[in-house]
Image: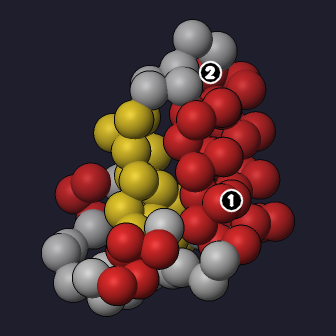
């Protein structure tokens, strides 16, 4: 994350596989060091839809990440 700070990257937009594991944990890590985070829920994958829903709800309500969809997000949008 230090490199992202040096490059003045913000906000972070996160998507990927294993929403309930890697994606949400990356959002947690980024928020803990002060980044604004957007998780693009429809650009993520999961093997368990129920766990994904719980993880995204946790990311939004507890972690403070913005959870949205690709079509609603625009580059340069802070959250």
Question: Which of the two residues, 77 or 9, is positioned nearer the viewer here?
Answer: 9
Residue 11 appears in the figure: no
The image shows residue 57, relative to residue 72, as above or below, that is above
User: In the visual, does 67 lie left or right of 25?
Assistant: left
Residue 13: % across, % down: 36, 62
Q: Position of residue 78 (x, y in %)?
A: 37, 86
Query: What residue is shown with label 2?
Result: 49
Residue 2 image label? none
Q: Residue furthest left?
A: 75
Residue 2 visible in rendering = yes
Q: Is residue 23 left or right of residue 33?
A: left
Q: Mark 2 or mark 1, which is nearer to you? A: 1
| Image quadrant occupied by the C terminus | bottom left
Residue sitting at x 65%, y 77% = 33
Mark 2 vs 1, N-terminal side: 1
Residue drawn at 57 percent across, 11 percent down: 47
Q: Position of residue 20 (x, y in %)?
A: 66, 32
Q: Gap in Å between the C-alphas at discs 2 and 1?
A: 20 Å
Image location (x, y in percent) of residue 23: 54, 42
Residue 16: name its quadrant.
Answer: top left
Tell whether label 1 touches label 2 (CB within 8 Å). Answer: no
Residue depicted at 20% across the width and 73% down the height: 74
SS for tag 1? helix
Work out whether residue 72 or residue 62 is closer to the camera in this orientation and state it. 62
Q: Which residue is mark 1?
A: 28
């Amino acid at each position: 994350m230090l490199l992202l700070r040096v490059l003045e990257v913000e906000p972070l937009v996160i998507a990927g596989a294993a929403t309930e594991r890697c994606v949400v944990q990356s959002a947690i890590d980024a928020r803990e060091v002060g980044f604004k985070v957007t998780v693009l829920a429809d650009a993520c994958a999961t093997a368990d839809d129920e766990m994904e829903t719980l993880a995204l709800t946790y990311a939004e309500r507890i972690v403070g990440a913005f959870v949205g969809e690709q079509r609603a997000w625009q580059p340069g949008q802070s959250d």
